[in-house]
Amino acid sequence: MTTFIATIEHVVKGPVWGCQDCGQCVLHSTGMTCPMNCPKTLRNGPCGGVRENGHCEVKPEMKCVWLKAYDRTQDWPLPATWKAEYNHLRPPVDNRLKGTSSWKNFFTKRDRWTPTGWKNSTDESAAQGADH
Amino acid sequence: MSTLEHKLTKTNETVFTAEFHTLDGNGFEKAKKVADRFRGWFDGVNATDNTAAHAHVSNVASAIAMKQLGLEPILQVVCRDKNRLAQQADIMGASMFGVENFVALTGDDVTAGDESEARRVFDLDGPQLVRLMSTIKRGEYMSGRKIDPAPHMFIGAVENPGAPPFEYRVQRVAKKYAAGAKFLQLQICYHQDRLEKFCAGVRDAGLAGKIAIIPTIVLVKGARPLNFMHNSVPGIDVPADQIARVEKAADPAEEAYLQTLEFSQHALAQPGVRGLHITDFRNDDTLERLMTDLGRVRRITTTNEDKDDHAYSA
């Protein structure tokens, strides 16, 4: 069953969004643009190597994934809650989920698991930068 | 507290940081020579992490060498070559030798280097690495395993004000600030209008005084390195008139210096800018000239020998 769901998801999302089966989909928060198509798989915005024409440092023929994500988030009629998540700090990829269904992981909340140290660090604690 | 942290958080003084030279064969001897040129000028010097995706002496080894040679290192950690476990090990290893300044970068892609066939890692991205550094500073590894006592850390990040999408770069700064970055070293930017907009944007985002902006300035001898940066370094665009200005000058080396000085003064005049990061490709007396022209006084408080005695007890 699990494999079946993953297969369906792959068939649907592969051709449309170039789904890389990371198993922890963030498409809704990135203007329906899959960040795993960035050659560096960056999940929190573009690197500093974007070319003058807005194309990728690694694949000059491809527009930077994050320029697409940014434009679409501004321009597409996406739900406000999705747009609001655009600037959230997305956590590191959980590599154990590779190849699994992100739909299943969403409903079981498995895709929201983060390591304890990451979870314990908040914007507030980081900004204050408590000295030792 | 490092000198860099002290100056940026407790004073209004302008800071100067620099890029340490890459080290290869006979590395420590070269490090000594660079340290002799840099000592007393800079508040922090970046121990680079395989710059432009070329293998060199490691960031951690360079940082330790700097401690021994009387420089204050800023450990650069990039995401290209190592996963989160190795990055944490490097941060903790450098910390063991008294390194307190850290800067997180995504890093150039492997294709920018001379071993394009290598596997690119990017287990974390730049903002995630900043947050990981904050986690370590708080006294925990990523897993939540305690670090007691927690290392003292002053955390920074980088941004490129000169690469698209320009307006979004400011939002990236906000994200990195929220993740724990207190200073921001910028990529060299030869478009003054872009730097102006970027700095104003950071101010308008309410980050003035919260994150110290440190633009990069590059000392070059002529038009060739400008052309190289323009053509070969992703994310750097040098306007044709800036290249022509140096290329067609009667004395290109002097004109290149004047250009650098002018860009330095312009950068220092922007809101939120607390200092400059200097990359010296010239290796001549213009480093001293630039620092003097910018009003910096060289302060040498320790010698190699003094530092050698307690390099390991920091």
Image (cartoon, coloured by chain):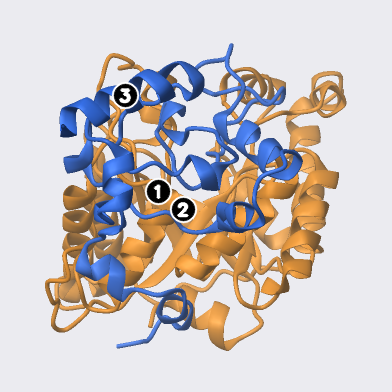
Chain colours: A blue, B orange
Callout 1 crowding tier (Cα within 10 Å): few <14, some 14–19, many ≥20 = some
> Is B9 drawn above or below residue B44 in the view shown?
below
Q: To which chain does the residue with label 2 belong? A: B
The answer to whether residue B296 is left or right of residue A102 is right
Instruction: Inspect this view and state whether residue B87 appears.
Output: yes
As shown in the figure, which amino acid type bears the numbered disc 1? Answer: Val
The answer to whether residue B314 is left or right of residue A38 is left
Residue B37: mark = 2
Q: Residue at x 62, y 71 (%)?
A: B297
Q: Secondary structure at mark 2?
A: helix
Question: Which residue is disc 3 drawn over?
Answer: A8
Q: Nearer the viewer, mark 3 or mark 1?
A: 3
Q: Secondary structure at mark 3?
A: helix
Q: Are marks 1 and 2 in contact (CB under 8 Å)?
A: yes
Q: To which chain does the residue with label 3 belong? A: A
Residue B148: mark = none
Q: Secondary structure at mark 1?
A: helix
Between the C-alphas of marks 1 and 2, the distance is 5 Å
Between the C-alphas of marks 2 and 3, the distance is 62 Å
Q: Residue at the top extreme?
A: A61
Image position, residue B258 (x, y; %): 80, 42
Residue B34: mark = 1
